[in-house]
Amino acid sequence: MANPVVMMRTPAETALIERFAAEKASLPGASQARAEAFARFEAKGLPSKRIESYHYTDVRNLMRTVAPVANDAVAGETMTLDGFPRLGFTNGRWQGGDAPAGVTVVPLADAYRDGLAPGLGMGEATDIVVDLNTAFARDGVAIRVAAGAEARLHLAFSEKTSAPASILPRVIVEIGEGASLMLVATHQGPAGIAYQVNEVVELRLGKQAKVEHVRLNLSGDKAMVLSSVAATLGDEAELQTTQIALGGEVCRHQVFVTYQGENAKAAIRGATMLRGHQHHDTTLVVDHAVPHGESRELFRTVVDGSAHGVFQGKIIVRPHAQKTDGQMASNALLLSDDAGMSNKPELEIFADDVVCAHGATCGSLDENQLFYLQARGLPRKVAEALLVEAFVGEVLETVSDDGLRETLAGLVSEWMRARAVS
Amino acid sequence: MLEIKNLHVEIDGKKILNGLNLTVKAGEVAAIMGPNGSGKSTLSYVIAGKEDYTVTEGEILLDGVNVLEMEPHERAHAGLFLAFQYPLEIPGVATMTFLKAALNAQAKSRGEDELSPGEFMKRVREAAGQLGINPDMLKRPLNVGFSGGEKKRMEILQMSLLAPKMAILDETDSGLDIDALRIVAEGVNAHRDPNHAFLVITHYQRLLDHIRPDTVHVMAKGQIVRTGGPEIALELEERGYAEYLGNAA
């Protein structure tokens, strides 16, 4: 057995330890969960590339310093979406807003003080980034959708800070039996400022609950964004979670789905557009712990400039999880010579009666298709845009709301137009 | 209208066209016939502007302007159209979206307004109706899952809508049954007039029963080796290409 490696603490790790000591007494509720999560961080430090799941995104190395907690709110944009009641958040803090019928919303701190506990259903799996959020989160909300209710909700996160700041919101959503929720979260922030986000959204789906979750990442171009979605699925629950990511400098989006009830379904999707020096990592852990679960993953990544995309998709099928049906696809399109993509699908199957498939591809635009379109009169840039929009379109078209889908398609077109003039 | 002078073309260092000369006049329907490997498809791709080929010598003039200086889309704007032997499948792009993008790009190049959605739909439906194209096909991604015959009809539909002055049909008859062949030929014949010209590339005489050419050129080893009237096509059907493979070049 190897000797434990003692690593020097980085300035960021030291700062986090000092901050926890200073803040511990004033952090609202959930003290046991906080203490446990922090202890794991203290023992392991920030995840580095030595840890397999962080191989491509060395947080320890990327997060040199820890920004102070955000405390100034400067002007900034906050998105609105037609047909969605909006809850606004500034630097992770809920600014109020009316919850629609069947939905109750309380500030996270109040919910924690009332005894709500953070819980990810992740079993023995733990993640230090999530732990840091668990340890430090003060801001965010707890949302409860009553059994049988149908609701739509827009969480509009706008980071409004004039200096580097750390923002650690947590959103815990409990969706009651038979309820259905369309939850859209938009994230915007200032350009040119190295703010740090570590955000966790817990989705707890009760029996036969249905959730369509769409996360839109329009973070500022210097932002480091660590976002995690942790979902637990009750019997016959159905989850769709889709991220559309265009922003940020270094981003890691994690999705942990745990099947707690039988005959549950999850569809996890993403469309990621990267350029310049952006780095975006999508890491999934889909844990089929019980029989008759279905999972579908569809990821499309477009990489330009010297940006780098990462996809790690792990599907675990536990010994008892017979009749699991899993299909995962991650396709990347590289638009420049310096663009890179690391695609790592993983299947860990311990049951023998399952159907699981994965496919990962990485390529450039098809010259023959481009020539065909050009021969019909489309300038090359227009032809490229048509093909790229079609490529990510397969993810966008799964978004059920027409207005939102058009907004997303518009953002992709805008991205391609910006490319055409650069 | 189209004048090709002493065209030499290579791909990966291999000579495909060896000093090809060809003239197609306005209003003319010219056919090129030739055996496999004679360079027919290379010629069509080079005219349309495919990048893989290197033109080492010669000119391709459309109404006196050398198109070799132009990008593929500029050639299309200038009035060139290639009906592909193997039309490409474009997943995720609805046929309608593509047709609209192509028509609008060409209208824009001529400084014209884009077609109104109503006018666009009307023209597409009319043209599709004439070619026996089911309107439902237009909602599907371009050419994806289309049969060989459907793809060729789609090429002719695009030609009808774009109304090019110089259309090149590269083996449009391949993969067509006799009914589809007749429909495609009617689509071409409908556009014959003194301002439009066609270059019909084919291996067989069959298509030329339906699209009567004014001129037939025989191509072998990267050159036009014989030019004459429609009777040449019949002769080739009977005697084959053997005599051109021995003594050409």
Image: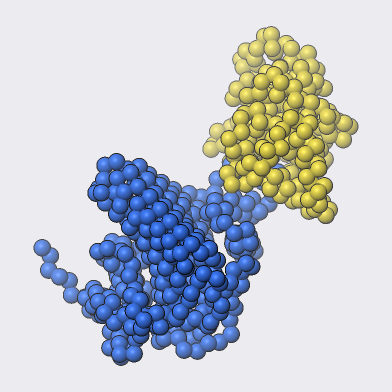
Q: Is residue A401 left or right of residue A231?
A: right
Chain A on-screen colour: blue
Q: Which of these two is toward me, A242 or A94? A: A94
The answer to whether residue A204 is visible is yes
Q: Tell me residue A31's x, y (percent).
A: 29, 82
Q: Is residue A155 left or right of residue A297?
A: right
Structure colour scheme: by chain
Q: Tell me residue B76's x, y (percent).
A: 74, 44
Residue at image coords 63%, 20%: B35
Q: Which chain is yellow?
A: B
Q: Which of these two is toward me, B156 or A411? A: A411
Residue at image coords 62%, 46%: B93
Residue at image coords 79%, 26%: B186
Q: Which of these two is toward me, A257 or B151? A: A257
Q: Is residue A59 above or below residue B87?
A: below
Q: Tell me residue A32's x, y (percent).
A: 26, 79
Q: Is residue A353 left or right of residue A111?
A: left
